[in-house]
Image (cartoon, coloured by chain):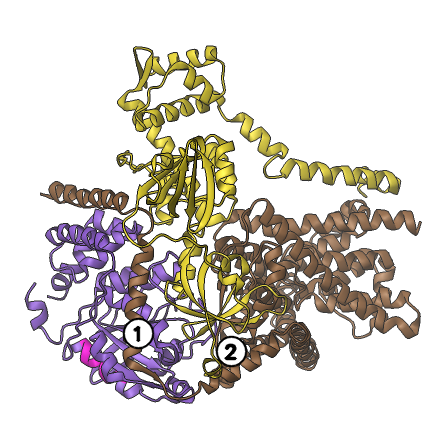
Amino acid sequence: MSNQHNCENCPVHHRENLIRLGIAMDRVDYVVALAGNPNTGKSTVFNNLTGLRQHTGNWPGKTVARAEGGYSWGEKRYKVVDLPGTYSLLSTSTDEEVARDFILFGRPDVTVIVADATRLERNLNLALQILEITDRAVLCLNLMDEARRNNLEIDARNLSKELGIPVIPAAARQREGMPELIAAIEEVASGAYVCKPRRVKSQSAKLNHAISTLAGKLAADFPGLPNLNWVALRLLEGDQSIIEAVRSGDLGRLSSGVLSTSA
Amino acid sequence: MNTGALILLAIAPGTALLTGFLTVVLLVWAFWPKNGLIAVLNRARMNSQRVLLEDALKFLYDCEYKREACGLHSIAGNLHVSSDTATKLLDRLRTMGLISLDEQNFHLTDTGRSYALRIIRVHRIWERYLADETGIGQMEWHGEADRREHMMSPEAADALAAQMGNPVFDPHGDPIPTAEGQMPDHKGQPLSTLQEGSIARIIHIEDEPHTIYEQLAALGLYPGMQVYVLDVTDGTITFAADGEECVLTAMFASAITVEPFEGNAPVTARHPTLASLEPGEEAEVVGISPNCRGQQRRRLMDMGIVPGTRVKAEFRSASGDPVGYRILGTTIGIRRKQAEQVFIKKLETTAHEQSA
Amino acid sequence: MEKKTQNNHEDILSLANKLRWDQGGAFHDTVIESIYAEAARIARKTVQQTGTPNAYNLDLRIDRILTSRWLGFPIMFLMLALVFWITVSGANYPSGLLAGLLIDTLHPILKNGATSIGMPWWLSGVLVDGAYLSMAWVIAVMLPPMAIFFPLFTLLEDLGYLPRVAFNMDNLFRKAGAHGKQALTMSMGFGCNAAGVIAARVIDSPRERLIAIITNNFSLCNGRWPTQILIATIFIGGAAPAYLAGVVSAGAVVGIAVLGIFLSLVVSWGLSKSVLRGEASAFSLELPPYRPPQILQTLYTSLIDRTIFVLWRAIVFALPAGIVIWLVANVRIGDLSLAEHFIHWVDPVAMFFGLNGVIFLAYIIAIPANEIVIPTVLMLTVLSTGMAGVGSGTGVMFELDSIAGTENILRSGGWTLLTGVNLMLFSLLHNPCSTTIYTIYKETNSLKWTLVSTILPIVMGLIICFFTTQLWRIVVG
């Protein structure tokens, strides 16, 4: 398990699970997931990265089916998967399940969180939830042009320090910040940048106790799981797909499957 | 030529109209969902003997759970049958090996208990589903679930539960047994046992008998509310439920189960709701009413309605009802019905802030 | 070993269950609150407002106008009317062009080609007069209006106007137990019901989404507008004094469309009170900031995503239907074709409902697209009355340029003012076209709801036509 971190250029995605999730995995080095709130210009970022023309609807829940595309950079081939735009990952709508299952079971090499710079606080809600699940993410601070028009100043460096992941200011419509985003994706994917994601502790002592009890049990059965507390919380919330993953032992494959398939 | 059908054209329009009208009425009656012919026939077809057996098991389990004795008369009374019928029923249950009898009291055998738990599980999952996902009024949950519990297979109930995130409590606060038949111990104490000045949280409201539940529901009492006991005199208890003052007799108060509450100062005044916010006014969210459940509650929270968030009413829709609120930098339309579930604390809007 | 791990897994789950009972019901709130508190803390540290939020203030001013009590609805009706007007008037010319190319020019060439390579008459009939012609017809009449309507609609969507429509209309739909966004699927349905059904995806509550899907057919789609206009001009305009004819027939068509809106609300209400019971559930609708649309991209994607998508489905269904249409007109049992047998047999029943056998048969075999109903009606009328010198041959759909000529054929087929009125009603209230039915099935994944959406409007249509007819017989005599 320990050599997982030594291998700098190894992809971390879960190939088998990705294929099961319907992603064609031929000739792919890295898998990049695009997540974010509705109306953040996520699809524009997707189109800029992949050169495809996906429709950018001004609607929540627009990307009902997942869109995929790809690009090459620095001799590596990236597969980009556009996840449905959601406000949260903790409710039970189909969109949220699709997004969450992809990040959890597909284990993308990088998850790009597209956030609207003009309403950072709202978007951070989702970003923090995503950082509970994965420790490989980049925040794309989109719509910086609108933020400037609204006289908002955002301290991206400080934000990056707070979240523990790279933060790239961008204006996807003007293609501003796209080269930087691609570079940041590469750094996180290759392991050159090691994320230290911010994990939120709940304010309730009783809940924290329950989470740590359960997480302790999980750690014994599923060693090496990157998001123990989150899985424990989801079990407490009665999340069916997590319950099934625990019951069938699939959850174990999330932690150890990587080495066995890529070795 | 279709000579048979030709007769149709010979019918006088008046007769035709009348026949047509009657046909439509008949069709509507046949297909009407709740009291229509097909629905009624379906219900009648249901094995009523089995329903009685299952209801008796449920009742016996309930007695056991609350550690009460359970005799012939209380069973007959609960099932609304004569003691004669009840005796026959209990005999059948005994020959089926589902119950045993000692000193006039009936007890569930292990098989009987797990049977009862299966029925209770379906019942409570249905109540949860009706409360969270359908918006059907709370007075109808129990009755509807009483019908469904006898028709739904355990597998279908499991699937329904999974879809809702495997709830562990029904909307009245009763625990839902697991598919394996596990149940937690009975918790809490009746509201009638609280002392003056104590603070507690409602964890359960008994939904039977119907008349008592109806009154408690009419007072707007739900599990999750904070109660602060203001006064106890013989026979009645006065308390504030989330700030709203209520007076109940001991009999009614014993239908409410509470759990002593660690934490904040008591809420003694009712908060205004988001619906009372006029366009241009600003407020801070205090909380969401416990009456707002399931997906509705989650949606509101996903939109940023959590304690401490600032909300500003911006404009009404052209037809008046949804109002656009500015929440965390986004304008969100919320219907009056939902806005009434959100408690707020109004803020003074200064001229400076208005321009900002 | 295997067994032991399995037990451990079950242990974890039952531990989780016990902990859940201890926690009580409300800890989800705590989790969300903690995350928001953290988000607020980070935002306070990193975001600074250095002046006035200009863009937002502009949005707010626009919103106050677009949602105002007095201007909100008039602006909305104007916008939608403009979209429909541009669609209907803009589609005429390219439709004519396509018809000229595919039907008037290419069809005879193919027919001659088939003869010259020695293809038997029945094979060229099936392939060229049946399959090809119905496909050509569908393309000619469907493609132009859709290629105009969808981009316009998508532009309004990208601009951010459509969420405001849903916001303004929500009150009405809430009373019918439905979702405000149904206003959008309904408007989309005026373009194409299949697209309207797909658009219902934006409604996230399953109950309300189903209501929107089932009632979408009550929006008079692009394929039915021409039928309505033609019949209204011939029969209703014809019955009015000449100087009023235009106004009266236009009024009748608008009346049918309004009746459709009314019925869709009534049916929504009925469904939400019965089989899809429950109050209108959570409604929260984000009103996104106005953003200038990316016009070229919108054109491209709405053509690919919507127009071509729907057209392709329609073509797939039109091909076999074209073959069936040709066959029923040409396969003979005894002296008469299958079509004539059916028409004669069903005529009395159809007349009882104020329609006729030709109409019944036309609606059955022209199920792929409402656009080919009138050509099929004309072909069948000529066939069943044995008219000579009109049309292009047995089983070959046709349309006439002159309204008078069309009127002649219909009147000699026994049509009266009553038949016209009933046809207009039945055109509004009958099963959705096969493309829409298929789309409903795809979207709901349920045979039951597909059947309900298909049969409910037919039953309603027959009932309404029946009462109209019988009342007419009493009043008019």
The chain coloured brown carries which letter?
C
Q: Residue at x 22, y 42 (%)?
A: C14
Q: Which hue belongs to chain A?
A: purple
Kindly report the distance in space between the C-alpha atoms of the residues bearing marks 1 and 2: 22 Å
Q: Main secondary structure of the magenta part?
A: helix
Which of the 4 image quadrants contains residue A4?
bottom left
Residue C158 has which mark?
2
Task: Let me know if residue A185 appears in the view.
Answer: no
Q: Residue at x 41, y 71 (%)?
A: A38
Q: Which hue belongs to chain B?
A: yellow
Considering the image in quadrants, where does the C terminus of chain B appear?
bottom left
Horizontal and vertical percent for residue B188?
30, 37
Residue type beneath disc 1: Ile
Name the secondary structure under disc 1: strand
Horizontal and vertical percent for residue C168?
60, 68
Residue stretch rendered in magenta on the structure: A181-189
Q: Is residue C312 above or below residue B64?
A: below
- Disc 1 designates what residue? A113
Residue type beneath disc 2: Asp
Asked whether A68 falls inside the magenta stretch, the response is no
Name the secondary structure under disc 2: helix
Q: Could you say which is closer to the camera, residue B105 or residue A205?
A: A205
Q: Could you say which is closer to the camera, residue C111 or residue A228?
A: A228
Which of the 4 image quadrants contains residue A262?
bottom left
What subunit carries mark 1? A
